[in-house]
Image (tube, rainbow, N blue to C red):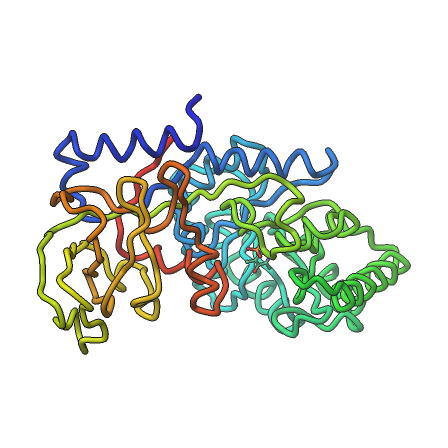
Amino acid sequence: MLSHDQSTTIAANQQCDTYAWFSQRAWVEVDLEALSHNVRQLRKFLSPHTQLMAVVKADAYGHGSVTVAQTALQSGASWLGVATVPEGIQLREAGIKAPILILGATYTSEQIHAIAHWKLQPTLCSPKQALIFSTTLEAIKYNTPIAVHVKLDTGMSRLGTDWQQATEFVQLVERLPHLKIASIYSHLATADSPDPTVMQQQHQRFKSAIARIKEMGIEPPCLHLANSAGTLADKALHYDMVRPGLAIYGLSPAPHLQNVIDLKPVLQVRARVTQVKTIAEATGVSYGHHFITPGEMRIAVVGIGYADGVPRNLSNKIQVLIRGKRVRQIGTITMDQMMLDVSIIPDLQEGEVVTLLGQEGSEKITVDDWAGELNTISWEILCGFKHRLPRLGVI
Ligand SMILES: *Cc1c(COP(=O)(O)O)cnc(C)c1O
């Protein structure tokens, strides 16, 4: 098995050798070996009875949901989490048989029909939604009860029934025909904070709601609470299943959780130099001329821009890697292209590969570098790559 470094280098070289690779101006490399490593690391961190749900919503955070789901399932995950019905159908159409939880809310009869047809498992957030499900399934005479997941709001103030009404809600769902409770769950709002106070309060609320449900004689078959941060922060949050997203893509949800397990970034972004030229001193570069050359400068144009997922607000702020060296991006990033100051590589040629995110030799540029520069989170940067660039699986 190749190491992470070797495999990406080989992939980049192959791109110069075949027409199919050469025809790409820019692409995302998805390192499936790194993905598998991350899932195995998480699996090792969990006790054997805790199941691992790989969260693959938003096209697996820009990595491609079918390939990611298949790799995660082969590496120790046993559940998949998506946000929407179409995301679930896409996995079923690809032949994936594992249980799929829809984390988002679903209400319409079209959604409910599709859930029943494709054997997806919905989240139930309110008594009203539970009634809609039950009556819709009654109307289509759907005979086998569908597995549903009861969502409690313990402090996120997003989806779910307030934890204090948990018993009434669970009793209602229990009584309604056509529904079978497969799990009870909640979601943490601050698990990535070094201060655990709110997380612990949410955990206490979850515990007390579950205790009251058990007192009513209802034994929940499965309980789950933890996203990536919760999983890494506190084993007491693991319960019967954990729901990591970010961690399976090899990023740490917070600096203080960086070293809990060894994670390798899965996504790398590369593009090609499309033109190299020398421009004179005091020349403006790109829209708005927000960069003016301080002297004569060798510049390169690269075929990647904000429509591909490189945020325009990174203009004039980032470095990229060419031949293992750091060079700076200059001028406004445009829709499909950007410019670099390549004065330190005077013999640079058109067609050479530029690494925007990823590793070349000992140098690397991370999603967290970009997120820090933009004062946003790594999740948002990753999702920016789900629209346009072709994805190349690298093993
Ligand atoms: C997105 C999501 C997750 C995964 O979150 P990460 O922070 O990426 O691990 C888990 N649970 C729910 C309900 C989610 O919406």
Image-based side of 376 in relation to 200, left or right: left
Quadrant (top left/top right/bottom left/bottom right) for the N terminus: top left
Q: Which of 29 and 295 is in front in this view?
A: 295
Please name the residue shown 59% across and 39% down the image. Answer: 262
Ligand 1, seen in the image, is in the quarter at bottom right
Residue 304: % across, % down: 22, 56
Residue extending farthest front: 295
Residue 328: % across, % down: 29, 57
Q: Nearer the viewer, residue 281 or 160?
A: 281
Residue 121: % across, % down: 56, 52
Image-based side of 313 in relation to 77, left or right: left
Residue extending farthest bottom: 288
Please name the residue shown 71% across and 40% down the image. Answer: 50
Q: In this view, does 188 lie above or below 182?
A: below
Image-based side of 395 in relation to 127, left or right: left
Please name the residue shown 46% across and 50% down the image. Answer: 117
Residue 272: % across, % down: 19, 47
Quadrant (top left/top right/bottom left/bottom right) for the C terminus: top left
Which image quadrant for residue 260? Answer: top right
Q: Nearer the viewer, residue 280 or 153?
A: 280
Residue extending farthest top: 1
Image-based side of 192 in relation to 350, left or right: right
Please name the residue shown 34% across and 60% down the image. Answer: 318
